[in-house]
Image: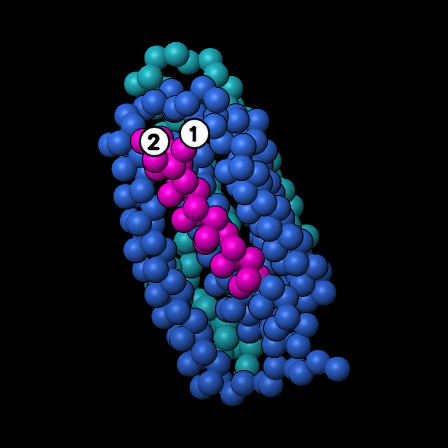
């Protein structure tokens, strides 16, 4: 479960937060630059969905809901306690 | 002096892993139901006001509190990762920092409320205060949960093998962040 070393995992977190920060800044700039409301809503929706997807996947570990992860988690727990 | 998590038998370890999987699934169901509540609030904003956003809304404060909340997601991630690797002291520090940044976000929302030049009785004000208020209530409960996690980590109740409590609280924190990812453009950026 721990998978990567702590240093590697923390570095990945840095990349993720950098992407989110840049996306937020771009989102703000796009909102200032676009006057067309439907186009603005489309652009902001794309930014919001993309940012949410990154957080859900990278920070909330949505992949851990997968049955394959659950099986690996049980095997690792058994191995660690043996 | 801190208590150490006892070693588990293989059967107990398997049972605990299964329980964690069930807990994780239940937590996601909670996110789904709570997310629907926030989605209804966002839909109501457009139903009541269309895409109108008051010019006097302070965009600078909006961007700052959004950045602050994003930063807190990073420190929360650091805290959970550290504890998952057995680095409890660093994990506690990061979780405490997350709670402080979360409190700063709530204060930022309070400042935004105090300087808002629209009233709760106006259409946009109704949406703005209900959406930010409901979200801030989640932030405040998240801060309380983070402080509980910091306390429990200090008592030695978490380890690299046993830290579901921290993971759940940090996931909740990220969920609150995801909600704001949608609320920020809905309240501030749509024109």
**Snapshot quadrant of residue B163:** bottom right
The reply to whether the C-beta atoms of the residues labelled 1 and 2 are less than 8 Å apart is: yes
Residue under the point 46% across and 57% down: B172
Q: Quadrant of the C terminus of chain B?
A: top left
Chain A, colour shown: cyan
| Residue A72 against residue B74 in the figure, above or below | below
Q: Chain of mark 1?
A: B
Q: Quadrant of the N terminus of chain B?
A: bottom right
**Snapshot quadrant of residue B126:** top left
Q: Which mark is residue B118?
A: 1
Residue B34 percent coordinates (x, y): 34, 54
Q: Are the residues under marks 1 and 2 on the same chain?
A: yes
Q: Is residue A45 magenta?
A: no
Q: Nearer the viewer, residue B73 or B112?
A: B112
Crowd around label 1: few <14 · some 14–19 · many ≥20 (10 Å): some
Residue A56 is at least partly visible in this image? no
Q: Which mark is residue A82?
A: none
| Residue A56 against residue B24 in the figure, above or below | above
Residue B92 is at least partly visible in this image? yes
Magenta stretch: dominant secondary structure: helix
Say left or right for A60 vs B63: left
Q: Which residue is mark 2?
A: B122
Chain seen in blue: B
Residue under the point 54% across and 32% down: B115
Residue A5 percent coordinates (x, y): 64, 57
- Disc 1 on helix, strand or loop? loop
Q: Nearer the viewer, residue B86 or B71?
A: B71
- Disc 2 on helix, strand or loop? loop
Residue under the point 45% across and 19% down: B55
For marks 1 and 2, give the CA distance: 7 Å
Q: Chain of mark 2?
A: B
Residue under the point 64% across and 52% down: B100
């Amino acid at each position: 479960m721990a998978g990567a070393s702590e240093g590697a995992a923390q570095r990945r977190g840095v990349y993720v937060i950098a992407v989110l920060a840049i996306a937020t800044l771009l989102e703000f700039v796009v909102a200032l630059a676009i006057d067309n409301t439907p186009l603005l809503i489309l652009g902001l929706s794309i930014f919001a969905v993309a940012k949410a997807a990154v957080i859900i996947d990278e920070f909330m570990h949505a992949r851990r809901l997968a049955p394959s992860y659950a099986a690996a988690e049980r095997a690792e727990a058994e191995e660690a306690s043996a | 002096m801190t208590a150490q998590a006892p070693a588990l038998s293989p059967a107990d370890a398997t049972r605990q892993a299964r329980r964690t999987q069930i807990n994780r699934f239940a937590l996601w169901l909670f996110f789904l139901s709570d997310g629907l509540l926030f989605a209804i609030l966002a839909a109501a904003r457009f139903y009541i006001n269309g895409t109108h956003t008051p010019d006097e809304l302070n965009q600078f404060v909006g961007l700052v509190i959004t950045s602050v909340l994003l930063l807190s997601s990073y420190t929360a991630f650091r805290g959970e990762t550290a504890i998952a690797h057995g680095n409890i002291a660093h994990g506690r520090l990061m979780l405490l920092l997350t709670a402080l940044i979360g409190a700063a976000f709530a204060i930022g929302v309070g400042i935004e409320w105090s300087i808002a030049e629209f009233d709760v009785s106006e259409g946009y004000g109704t949406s703005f205060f209900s959406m930010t208020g409901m979200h801030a209530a989640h932030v405040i409960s998240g801060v309380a949960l983070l402080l509980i996690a910091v306390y429990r980590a200090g008592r030695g109740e978490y380890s690299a093998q046993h830290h579901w409590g921290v993971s759940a609280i940090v996931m909740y924190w990220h969920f609150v962040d995801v909600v704001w990812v949608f609320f920020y453009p809905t309240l501030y950026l749509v024109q």
